[in-house]
Image (spheres, rainbow, N blue to C red):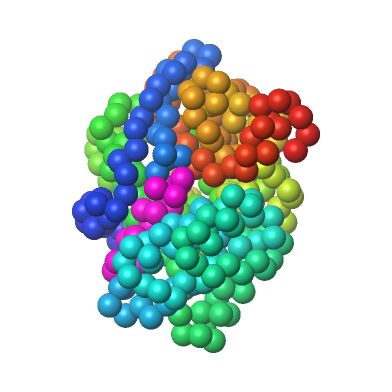
Amino acid sequence: MHLDIPSAYERVRKYVRKTPVISAEIGTARVFFKLENLQYTGSFKVRGAFNKIIKHKSRVKGVIAASAGNHAQAVARAARILGIDKVKIVVPRSAPEIKKRNIKLLGAQLIVEGSHLNESLKVANEIALSERMTFVHPYDDLEIIEGQGTLGIELMNYDFDYLLIPVGGGGLASGVCTALRQFSTHSSVRIIGVVARSAPSFFYSFKQGKMVAVEPKDTIADGIRLKSPSELTFSILSRCMDDVVMVDESAIRSAISWAYYHLGQVVEGAGAVGIGALLQGKVTTNGRVMVVVTGGNIDERTLDAILDGSPI
């Protein structure tokens, strides 16, 4: 299994934004925040989407993807910029309205099927086979992982001891972990995955050393609401990730609010779990911590409710 992440970075760099890193203090830790919420389409997902589609562009007649929303927007954007007209996206019924709206604005055909992402993936795969479209998986794909790993290349410019990174399907974490472990300057960084307690499959899989599927509950962290990671991402993360922690819904809400008032950033639930882990004391250190803020696509009414302390 070989991931050529530096080559992927050269491939996608003109299509992605080199997002900023800002810093603040949480408790005794100096914390840096990699702001992928400011990425094109509002999340890191464009990195993998462009890498995948560019590598197969000459053979692609149409693309289909399944996503909780962010991967879908990324695939739709990449297809449009690269001149692919036929694009279909399957999202679960729980996908936020802002993500569904943006998918349609990017010119893709929206299909709402499934109670969670794993069910939507099955539908998308069936359509891909019946209509002979290229299936762009959100995480169970080496070329997607390779593209997501380009975020790790940008982290090389910073000095930190810990990395907190959200884990749903595990594509981003797999790519970034691989990138950091390949470079001696960052090979000793302690990498900690963060999951929502309402979608804990990766937590139990990692702790038990085997794939464990857990039916997810409703969570504000919709971007990491999965029944299970993939065998591919689990095998990578089992080797290169040091630990994984869970955060509850109240911590995620607090993290979204904290990011808004202390960083001036709009952050979605999945993007805020690393901040939540620090606020909830799941990770404590006097060292330097890098937190990957993976996305900012949150419904306006949901954000308003969180900031007001109202029920969602």
Q: Is residue 5 visible?
A: no
The one nearer the camera, 180 or 107, is 107
Q: Is residue 24 visible?
A: yes
| The C terminus sits in image quarter | top right
Residue under the image location 45 percent in, 32 percent down: 291
Q: Is residue 11 left or right of residue 274?
A: left
Residue under the image location 64 percent in, 35 percent down: 303
The furthest residue to the top: 28
| The N terminus sits in image quarter | bottom left
Vertical position of residue 118 compared to residue 244: above or below: below
Q: Give the residues in magenta.
A: 40-55
Magenta region includes residue 30: no
Residue under the image location 42 percent in, 35 percent down: 35
State the image coordinates of residue 191 (x, y, percent, origin top left). 44, 37
State the image coordinates of residue 298 (x, y, percent, origin top left). 59, 42
State the image coordinates of residue 81 (x, y, percent, origin top left). 33, 63
Q: Examine the residues drawn in magenta and state their main secondary structure.
A: helix
Residue under the image location 51 percent in, 85 percent down: 131
Q: Toward which corner of the image does residue 251 lie, by quadrant? A: top right
Magenta region includes residue 46: yes
State the image coordinates of residue 252 (x, y, percent, origin top left). 64, 33
Vertical position of residue 122 compared to residue 140: above or below: below
The one nearer the camera, 271 or 85, is 85
The furthest residue to the right: 311
Q: Toward which corner of the image does residue 306 lie, by quadrant? A: top right
